[in-house]
Structures are given as C-alpha cells and as structure tokens.
C-alpha cells in the first residue's frame, strides 16, 4: 500500500475522535461518514488527501450538482467541503510528523500542498501540529 494512503487510513480514527469531541456532535465527521451520499466523499478525501480536490470533483463522487452538494454538505457538517478537506489534510500531516521523519516538503506535497510556504500558512492558521513537531524531517519550515 502506498505510504500516503496508509497514513490516511491510519488518520481515520484521529479524524473521527477529533470531530466526535466537538460540542455539536450532530454536525461532525461521523455524520458525514455515515451519510449515504457524503460518506464516499469523506472516504475519498481520506484515501487521497494529496489529490487536487475541488467542490465540483467532490460533488461528482456524490453524484450531485455542485450547488446541491455544497448545500447538503453544509447542512450535514455545518461547514464547507474544502474546510473539512483542509482539516483532514492537516490532521494527516500532523500524524505523519509524529510518526515519520520525512522532509516537510514531502509531507506537504503528500497532503495536497503545492509549496512548503502554503503548507506552513495552513499549519499556522490551524494550530493542529505542535510547533516542536514541525521539521522533524530532514528539512525544516524554519531553517536556522
């Protein structure tokens, strides 16, 4: 199994725990995973976090129009498909930082970021990864 796919599969429990722990448990990743149309979308996000997903491509997985998909996703999750994708990508990256010694750029690319700087901005905005875990690989986001 591909390293990134394996990492994504290992991230599923992390993602589920995170979203279940939210105050509003009716609108979380579990409700998305269990939804008849949206479950396949979340599974694809987890299996291929590095894919260049768009709302249109995610809607096609659910066999829906872009507008209908976006509205259903928001109704079920309380947020947008791309916000959930970003959160999942960063959770997968956080897990990769804690388990592997890959260069930051490799982890960034494996979860869908085209550049280390865009990955760093997303990490900083989310605070998902403890600062001490960033750069455990052979290169760092903050070279000395």
Image: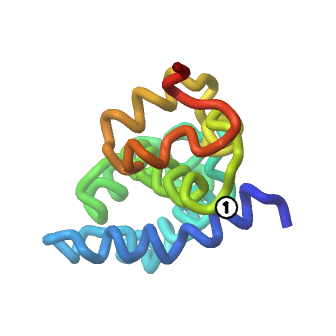
- Disc 1 is placed on an element classified as helix
Q: Residue at x 32, y 42 (%)?
A: 126
Task: Please tell me in which quadrant of the rendered image residue 121 appears.
Answer: top left
Nearest the camera: 98 or 127? 98
Q: Is residue 86 above or below residue 26?
A: above
- Give the colouring mode of the picture: rainbow
Residue 37, image x and y in percent? 50, 68
Q: Is residue 98 left or right of residue 70?
A: right
From the image, tell me which residue sits under label 1.
Answer: 47
Q: Is residue 68 left or right of residue 58?
A: left
Q: Residue at x 68, y 50 (%)?
A: 101
Task: Please tell me in which quadrant of the rendered image residue 99 appears.
Answer: bottom right
Q: Is residue 19 left or right of residue 134?
A: left
Judged from this view, the residue extending furthest toward the left is: 23
Residue 79, image x and y in percent? 28, 51
Can I make out residue 73 in this image? yes
Can I make out residue 62 in this image? no
10 Å neighbourhood of mark 1: few (<14), some, or many (≥20)?
some
Q: Is residue 92 above or below residue 126?
A: below
Q: Residue at x 68, y 43 (%)?
A: 110
Residue 134, image x and y in percent? 49, 41
């Amino acid at each position: 199994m591909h390293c990134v796919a394996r990492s994504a599969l290992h991230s599923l429990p992390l993602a589920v725990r995170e979203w279940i722990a939210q105050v509003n448990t009716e609108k979380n990743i579990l409700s998305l995973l269990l939804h008849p149309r949206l479950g396949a979308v979340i599974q694809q996000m987890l299996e291929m976090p590095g894919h260049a997903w768009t709302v249109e491509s995610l809607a096609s997985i659910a066999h829906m129009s872009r507008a209908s998909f976006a509205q259903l996703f928001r109704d079920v999750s309380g947020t947008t498909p791309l916000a959930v994708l970003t959160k999942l990508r960063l959770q997968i990256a956080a897990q990769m930082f804690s388990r592997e010694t890959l260069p930051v750029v490799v982890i960034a690319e494996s979860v869908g970021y085209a550049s280390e700087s865009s990955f760093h901005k997303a990490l900083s905005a989310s605070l998902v990864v403890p600062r001490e875990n960033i750069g455990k690989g052979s290169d760092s986001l903050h070279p000395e």
